[in-house]
Image (cartoon, rainbow, N blue to C red):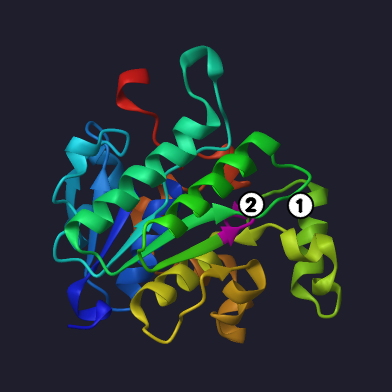
């Protein structure tokens, strides 16, 4: 069976990032399963009727046992830009431990490919967050598992108001040769561009890079997709999911991450 035939598992069901990637996979014709945090099932909206889903806690290895069987790829989207050490929510716990547990699940369940949504380093991202993401990347490299790292910039919904700095860096990222400048390489990106790129990496055996940067994600979208109007850009999302994600300015301000159940 090819990866496409066996289906894709997405962690982070019911969140901004996970739902957009799942919807993009469906638009590509893939069979999609999702892992949802217990108690967050209602957040899936219409995706609950278009995907297979089950509850799990990515910080509890026991709850992940067997969840990835019969899937050819797992896309891990869970993490957070915001730590709360007073509550025991360090960057390492939020970003490294969850990725480590999901990576181990892939190995034990015989999954052929894991995709980790990581992050680019930018002036507006905290060092502790980037450090924990790089630790997660290195851990995957030691597992002996085929993996892809997607270093995403900040994400936003097209048509939503954004800070002028983010608008300027997005413009630089989209106009060659300005896109080669540092701010062009880290500029915020529409969520639909990232979601399509991740979906296409997951379902196609032709994409074999270990690390994908924002410029790679843009190349995985057609010119028409890059230029789409806001309404067309989110057309692959079911209506309720699309509306639930509407207040998107940048994904650092959106509830895309889970919090460990024992800390909620």
Q: Which residues are magenta?
A: 151-158
Marks 1 and 2: CB-CB under 8 Å?
Answer: yes
Identify the image quadrant of residue 235.
Answer: bottom left
Res 166 label: 1
Q: Is residue 140 visible?
A: yes
**Front in this rendered view, residue 48 or 247:** 48
Q: Residue at x 37, y 57 (%)?
A: 143
Residue 45 higher or lower than 198, as above or below: above
Residue 64: x and y in percent read 20, 43
Q: How many marks?
A: 2
Q: What secondary structure is marked by label 2?
A: loop
Q: Residue at x 46, y 48 (%)?
A: 245
Tell me the quadrant of the picture where the C terminus can be found.
top left
| Residue where numbered disc 2 is placed | 154
Give the CA distance from mark 1 to mark 2: 9 Å
Q: Residue at x 45, y 68 (%)?
A: 198
Residue 228: x and y in percent read 59, 75
**Front in this rendered view, residue 32 or 27:** 32
Tell me the quadrant of the picture where the N terminus can be found.
bottom left
Q: Is residue 47 visible?
A: no
**Earlier along the polypeptide chain: callout 1 or callout 2?**
2
């Amino acid at each position: 069976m090819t990866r496409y035939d066996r289906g894709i598992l997405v962690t982070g069901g019911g969140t901004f990032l996970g739902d957009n990637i799942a919807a993009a996979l469906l638009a590509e014709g893939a069979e999609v399963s999702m892992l949802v945090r217990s108690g967050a099932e209602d957040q899936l909206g219409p995706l609950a009727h278009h995907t297979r889903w089950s509850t799990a806690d990515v910080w509890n290895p026991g709850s992940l046992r067997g969840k990835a069987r019969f899937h050819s790829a797992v896309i891990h989207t869970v993490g957070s830009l915001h730590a709360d050490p007073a509550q025991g929510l360090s960057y390492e716990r939020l970003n490294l431990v969850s990725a480590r547990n999901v990576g181990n699940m892939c190995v034990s369940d015989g999954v052929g490919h894991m995709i980790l949504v990581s992050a680019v380093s930018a002036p507006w991202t905290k060092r502790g967050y980037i450090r924990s993401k790089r630790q997660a990347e290195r851990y995957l490299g030691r597992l002996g598992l085929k993996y892809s790292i997607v270093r995403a910039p900040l994400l936003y919904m097209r048509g939503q108001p954004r800070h002028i700095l983010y608008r300027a860096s997005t413009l630089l990222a989209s106009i060659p040769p300005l896109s080669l400048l540092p701010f062009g390489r880290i500029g915020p990106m529409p969520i639909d561009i990232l979601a399509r790129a991740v979906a296409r990496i997951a379902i196609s055996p032709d994409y074999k890079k270990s690390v994908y940067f924002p410029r790679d994600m843009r190349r995985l979208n057609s010119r028409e997709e890059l230029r789409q109007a806001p309404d067309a850009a989110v057309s692959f999302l079911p209506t309720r999911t699309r509306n639930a994600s509407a207040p998107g300015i940048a994904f650092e301000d959106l509830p895309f991450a889970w919090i460990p159940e024992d800390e909620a």
